[in-house]
Amino acid sequence: TTGVNGGRVYAYHVNDTSAAPLPPTAPVSSPAPSPTPTPGPAPAPIPAPISSNLLYPGPSAGNGSAGSLVQSGWFSGSGNGYTVSLPNAVTKGNTLVVSIIGWFGTTALAPSDGVNTYVKSTEIGSSGSYAQDGAVYYAHNIAAGTLRVYINGGSGAVIAGVAVMEIKGDFVSDSFAWNSAISGSADSGATTLSSANGFAVGLIESKYSNVDTPGTGWIKIGGNDGLYMYRQLTSAGLYRATGNFTYNPWESLIVTFKPVIIPPISTPVFIAGDF
């Protein structure tokens, strides 16, 4: 405001104190730095599945041993049917082998024990005047129990002898060979065991004379009109059934048996944890 008084010019500054005072301005400050985070434990990695090859073998294949003879029984005579009892109860999972000698005719000879199913490995017919008929049957992975094995030759058949063997382990027929001649030394010819740890049965039939002496490596189970034999086989290879006796017509048969092995199963296995 300006004014004149007595020739003088005055300047006035008016301060209006009636208005409310302005609030103080807050100081501007820089933001505080964020704290550095403390690292925690690293998360556990998710494990990859572990592939486990599990082998589920038959009893003999599981321990890597060849089929061993547990027990046997045999009978010799002349009729169209026989029953053979083993000395003791058989063990579940083992193998039964039945060898038969006679004149079979046309009727099936499959053994029966009321529990297990028998499969024919092979059957050979008599060769002219050489010998009798022969056959080998088996049942594998058998049920446990006390068994009586019955062989029924049917009408017109004559059963000269039967042998029953229990073998430790689960086995199936592999291969066979047979031969016939007139001499004092029987020889089936060679056949193959395709895998290790098996066994073989031999059957030598003679029409006129007993076969008394099995060949090297064979165990005599019994015999009258022929020879029933068993042999444990630890290695794959060629084998033959042999035996010695007086000069007579003969037929010689060998059947090899290999272990049953279920193929390995690859099963993913996961390890439990917090993922």
Image: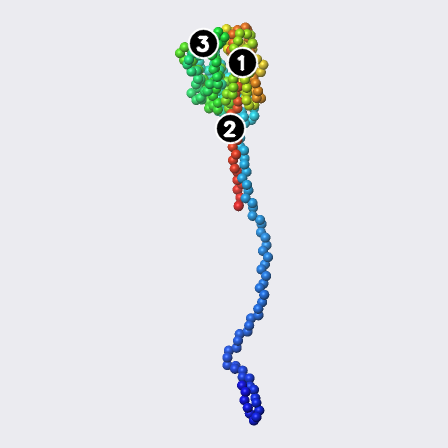
Quadrant of the frame with the N terminus: bottom right
Q: Residue at x 53, y 44 (%)?
A: 273
Tag 3: amino acid: Ser
Spot occupied by residue 110 in the image (x, y as percentages of width and height): 44, 17
Tag 2: amino acid: Ile
- The residue wearing badge 2 is 262
Q: Secondary structure at mark 3?
A: strand
Q: Secondary structure at mark 2?
A: strand
Q: Closer to the observer: label 3 or label 1?
A: 1
Is residue 261 shown to the viewer in this render? Answer: yes
**Left or right placement of residue 179 versus residue 105 in this view:** right
Spot occupied by residue 221 in the image (x, y as percentages of width and height): 52, 14
- Few, some or many C-alpha atoms within 10 Å of disc 2 (few <14, some 14-19, many ≥20)? few
Spot occupied by residue 245 in the image (x, y as percentages of width and height): 55, 8
Q: Residue at x 50, y 20 (%)?
A: 173
- The residue wearing badge 3 is 78
Asked if the residue under mark 2 is in contact with the one under mark 3, i.e. CB atoms within 8 Å, the reply is no
Pick whichever of labels 3 and 2 is earlier in the sequence. Answer: 3
Tag 1: amino acid: Ser
